[in-house]
């Protein structure tokens, strides 16, 4: 089939019991082992969650909440309503309509929660992983916890498991970026 890229995502809004939540960490360890095995064999496998160092993720995610919903992505329904993303469009909740294809965007309607920083998430502010975590998908948060600002327990467990696995990832396993490939301008 030629599939070589895997983007792993949990159904965060499902009902996760304690046993299932603790299994997430073990599964991330197995994913990392598989990723490193494939890299060692020079297989053309991509697992995007292991392709950036924690420091790179911290730089990219700093002061970011949620995802690109409403700013980097949108969804349009058959009726022409514009939503921040397909998850919100699937909700059919007009509170999250940010425009219409015949009228354009209603920037003032973009829910404040989608523009909020980490400080708007009271349960996340003191979390030691808040600088690598985006606080989850606002639409999933809303469905799972009733709040755009509060991620479900499975999301937090996944972020912890991913961060722990990343701490075990050898620096040599990370792909070189274009910036790393460029010669030093000082050294010529």
Image (cartoon, rainbow, N blue to C red):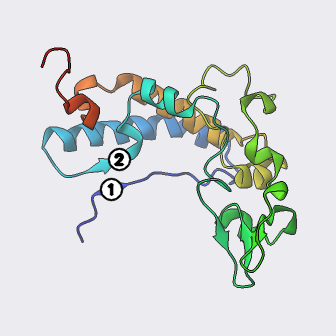
Q: Which residue is mark 2?
A: 47
Nearer the observer, 91 or 60: 60
Q: Quadrant of the N terminus?
A: bottom left
Q: Residues within 10 Å of mark 2 (few under 14, many from 20)?
A: some
Q: Tell me residue 3's x, y (percent).
A: 28, 64
Relative placement, left or right, of 154 versus 54 is right
Q: Determine the residue positioned at 76% across, 38% down.
A: 116
For the question of whether residue 177 can be seen, the reply is: no
Q: How many marks?
A: 2
Nearer the observer, 76 or 16: 76
**What is the secondary structure assignment of the residue under circle 2?**
strand
Do the residues under discs 2 and 1 have CB atoms within 8 angstroms? yes
Residue furthest out toward the bottom: 78
Determine which quarter of the picture holds residue 22: top right
Q: Tell me residue 167's x, y (percent).
A: 40, 22
Nearer the observer, 86 or 146: 86
Q: Which residue is mark 1?
A: 5
């Amino acid at each position: 089939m030629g599939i070589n890229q895997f983007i792993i995502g949990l159904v965060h809004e499902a009902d996760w019991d304690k046993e299932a939540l603790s299994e997430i960490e073990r599964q991330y360890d197995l994913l990392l082992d598989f990723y490193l095995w494939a890299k060692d064999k020079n297989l053309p496998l991509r697992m995007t969650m292991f392709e950036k160092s924690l420091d790179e993720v911290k730089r990219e995610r700093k002061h970011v909440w949620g995802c690109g919903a409403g700013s980097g992505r949108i969804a349009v329904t058959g009726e022409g309503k514009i939503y921040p993303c397909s998850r919100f469009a699937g909700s059919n909740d007009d509170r999250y309509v940010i425009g219409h294809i015949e009228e354009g965007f209603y920037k003032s309607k973009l829910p404040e929660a989608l523009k909020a920083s980490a400080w708007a998430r009271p349960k996340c502010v003191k979390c030691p992983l808040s600088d690598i975590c985006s606080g989850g998908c606002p639409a999933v948060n809303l469905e799972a916890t009733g709040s755009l600002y509060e991620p479900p327990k499975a999301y937090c467990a996944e972020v912890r498991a991913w961060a722990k696995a990343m701490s075990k990832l050898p620096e040599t396993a990370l792909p070189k970026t274009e910036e790393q490939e460029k010669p030093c301008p000082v050294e010529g």
